[in-house]
Amino acid sequence: RGPPLRQASTKGANAGKQNMGKKSKKGKKNADKKEEPAPIDETPKGQKKDVSKVNPKKYHPKYVEAAWYEWWEAKGLFKPDFSMKEAKEHKDKFVMVIPPPNVTGTLHLGHTLMCAIEDTLTRWHRMCGRKTLWLPGTDHAGIATQTVVEKKLKREKNQSRYDLGREKFLEEVWKWKEQSGSHICRQLRRLGSSCDWSREAFTMDKQLNKAVKEAFCRMYEKGLIYRKARLVNWSCALQTALSDIEVDKKDIDKPTMLPVPQHDELVEFGVIHKFKYLMKEDPSVAIEVATTRIETMLGDVAVAVHPTDQRYKHLVGKEIQHPFIADRKMKVITDDVLVDPTFGTGAVKITPAHDPNDFECGMRHKLPFINILNDDGTMNSNAGEYQGKKRFVVRAEIIEALKEKGLYIGKDVNPMALGFCSRSGDVVEPVIRPQWWVNCEDMAARSVKAVEEGELKILPESHIQTWNHFLKNIRPWCISRQLWWGHRIPAYFIVVKNYKATEDDLKTAEANGYVVGSDSDAKFWVAARDQKEAEAKAYARFSGYKKEDISVSQDEDVLDTWFSSGLFPFSTMGWPDKTPDLSEYFPGHLLETGHDILFFWVARMVMMSLELTDKLPFDTVFLHAMVRDKLGRKMSKSRGNVVDPIHVMEGVSLQTLLDKIKNGNLPASEHKSAMIAQRKDFPKGIPECGADGLRYGLLTYMKQGGSINLDINVVVGCRNFCNKLWQAFKLSSMFFEVSGFKVPAHNSATVISAAEAKEEAKGLSSIDKWILSKLHNAALECKKGFEAFEFAAITTACKQFWYDEFCDYYLEMIKPVLYGADEAAKAAAAQTLYTCVDGGLRLLHPLMPFVTEELYQRLPGRDNAEGSCDSIMIASYPTPEATKRWENKELEEKMSDALSIIVSCTRKLRSIVGLNMEKTELYIKPPADQKSSSSMKIEDFAGVIGTLTYSDKVEFITDESKAPEKSLNEVKSGYTMYLPAGAFKSKMERLVLEYEKKATDATTRCSDIKTRMESQTYIAKTPQNIKDKDTESLKKLSGERDQHHASLEMFLAMMTSDERKALHEKKIQTWTQKLQKASKELEDYNAKIPAKEDKSYKKVMHKLTPKIKKAEMLKRQAGATLEKLQKMEIR
């Protein structure tokens, strides 16, 4: 029958399935053998790899993944024009834009998952014959890029951007972008991303800048964009406003000292300070307030109480004396929105310019908005004597000054969520500034309606609730950023010499708290596409003044990065111009991204597309979860659980991982914990897994709505799956050389007529028909998975076909045929083998592009096969419609009985008794009510069962009395399998001893867990999730214990009385020897103990005590066991 598959074709590969991370005995023996060096690919860039030159014995990711990507790109296979048919309708196309990564970025697992999903979908649609465009690009990342270049300037030239000036600084940024900005795109290529790079976009490109100006001007002209002074998140370190996504919230649950940029001393957070304000009329009367930011009291303008609070009724409307700013007008006001009379003292200090809730209160009561901070976080002139000092220095000084005045009461613990700038680590300050804002209400309502009416799908649907919550409660969007790098706001400030304010001007200014003609006055601003248009609009607005008295200057600020990103689906297609790409590829079909930017990016794309094009940018949104570590924790450098995708693809040693922690930007205080975590998770580093293994590993976690708790060992298992493919292909290739073999006329993607299908089936055995039916099932499940975005289902279907059905069963079953003498049967089997390999590779290609291309190119006679292509990338994908001709449920049912029940149980029995490849007899008793079929019986598969179970005789029996007198048996689904004891008689004594030990160990472990779980401390203090885990462990362990005892009883029953007695005598002899040995050791140790007065006594006892204790324990154990054995009565 020839060598078994496990030896001939999958050496070293099976570890990836059930023995992941374990080293086989064979592996240990061969550990010192020299590994096959990875071949070096020498294919010139852009040329096709010649696979005939090298045929490695095993899978080498680096060699396999070399050259293919450059060849695909050089041939233009990523372009939509390279399609298999003309796309006349929307459904014949597939268009998707990439979520543009930051130009400063480096590949992380979030990018990797995104690319794995998006490339898989793109390749599938392309193989399905659709005109496919996956458009790549990068985001200019305003704050991140400016910060990188500023640090570079400081490091290399000791200069700031202010030293260079705006124009020169921007030249430096563009220079950096050209030199380093494409790093992330090279990494995306490394993953196999089949984007159309000829259309690569950058959000600061000339065309996209034109789109940004047009969008701003149109929305301004419609009144959707306006200028107003409102609260913003302010980074004093970067001196710019921040979007909410650029603010990291950190929970502070107790008083904590933290470093703050630009401050030498640590600053305390997690406390609330209490102090008193004195009433102006009667300083003997005070009102107590509390705040976590006591320095903001310099901007206080009132104290609010609840209108029903009788404690303060006599103080309402009366003036308060500010302790540091004598002329500050403050009074007690009532507010039933902000104040809770049952909380604290029921009095709240009001700082409208520095707190969101106070801001709203200030708007309701028309209070003054007094900003106390300069852009750099120092105090301004409104802070009185504290002007010019840093804000947290002032915090400490204010407390001391209040103490001196007798106004400071004290501080209490106050858990809080503190906002930090994600770029600088600075504590974010709420600051009031005139900024540009977008009124999103109408756009948001249209976006909600699109989902409610089914025009826009959001998957998983659980995210619709988040979508509605954000959009139904949307607030004005601040789009101003005080940066130099970015799209400069196309708004121009108008200066009119000797302008005379009208009465309406003054009323409006007073109502909104600004000075006429200041930069907060919207009347003096226009939006324009260029300077010339701005001047024309200014002249028209102030037509009563001479042109020479009117000048305009463009706003120094830039737009929020999300503004240009929101236009990405159509600006990249040429909008606002009417381009061929815009008419051909907009709107798109899918937007795939992480759920964390559903509102920040996805919603803004939908809103802006509806507003500016009156179309949805795509019809489906698919959101993936965040990648966490295997314990479900967020990945962070301090935890040491961050995984670099490049390390996974290329492999890395533990030392390199540790060196990266030492040399990175993680604080030295956190090095130890991070390194401990790395040593624990990756004691031997990370083996080389390749892009295919990493992609496939991530996709195995992709169940809609499920979290992604990544265990790198799963990725290693997927890398081993690649090796399994490699070995299976090598073995299959041997059989393509049999005489009479021809490449099949049709493949798994070809729909053929009934007559052709009948002709194709001629000469096929039931085994061939079974595997083809399984290939049909795989094609069906893959199609369902792709349509439902259930990528885990696709990986399961592919792995089940290749691993369980093709490799484990089919290849083994056809060996007798392929090594036999029937040439016609050999040719038919070889053709089926070819069809399965070809179809299986096509099914896998979207998920594992490199290894499938490598093996596809190695298929013999492919150039002459119908439906064959130069690259598997553009080969047709197997469809259930095409493979329907192979469906055979009746055959599958019988084979399921033979394989899933009989073979698996027999293998289990053989495993229990330690039989490897020894031939044995096998007796099978089918269920009494077995369904009879005129065309098929279980007995017809005796040959298959014999091949797969190493049985030289397979006999079906109808009565238990016909089974061997002594045998090991297993019952499942009505079938009983008998393995005669004669097959393992020589191993019986070893088996009894082995299962005695297993049963004893399991019993001890069960007892330990049960004792621990019954303790009062455990019951009272252990979290429920730990209790549930322990309960499950105990249940599993109890099952193992019972199984071991049952096996032990079975083996003992198979022995004769004399054999059992002989074994018992051996055990007595063994334990007697152990007792003697322990006694002798104890005697020797005691003889070495010196007298207590001897100087060496302590030193000797320090060494001997552990050994004496161990010897005493062994002696007690041996004595007890021996006593127990001697009392036993063996029959």
Image: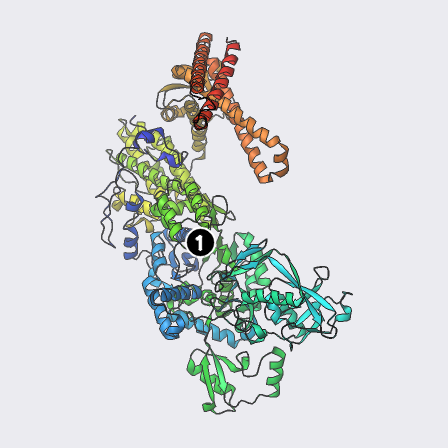
Nearer to us in this view, 963 or 752: 963
Direction from residue 576 to residue 330 in the image, left or right: right
Nearer to us in this view, 761 or 296: 296
Which quadrant would residue 387 be assigned to in this image?
Answer: bottom right
The residue pinned by badge 1 equals: 667
Nearer to us in this view, 79 or 342: 342
Q: Secondary structure at mark 1?
A: loop
Whether residue 572 is visible here, answered yes or no, is no
Residue 509 image offset from top left, x and y in percent: 60, 81
- Seen at 43% across and 52% down, the residue is 668
852 w.r.t. 981: above or below? below
Nearer to us in this view, 158 or 1101: 1101
- Seen at 38% across and 37% down, the residue is 16
Residue 46 image offset from top left, x and y in percent: 25, 55
Residue 1104 image offset from top left, x and y in percent: 44, 25
1051 w.r.t. 752: above or below? above
Whether residue 500 is visible here, answered yes or no, is yes
Direction from residue 78 to residue 465 in the image, left or right: right
Which quadrant would residue 252 be assigned to in this image?
Answer: bottom right
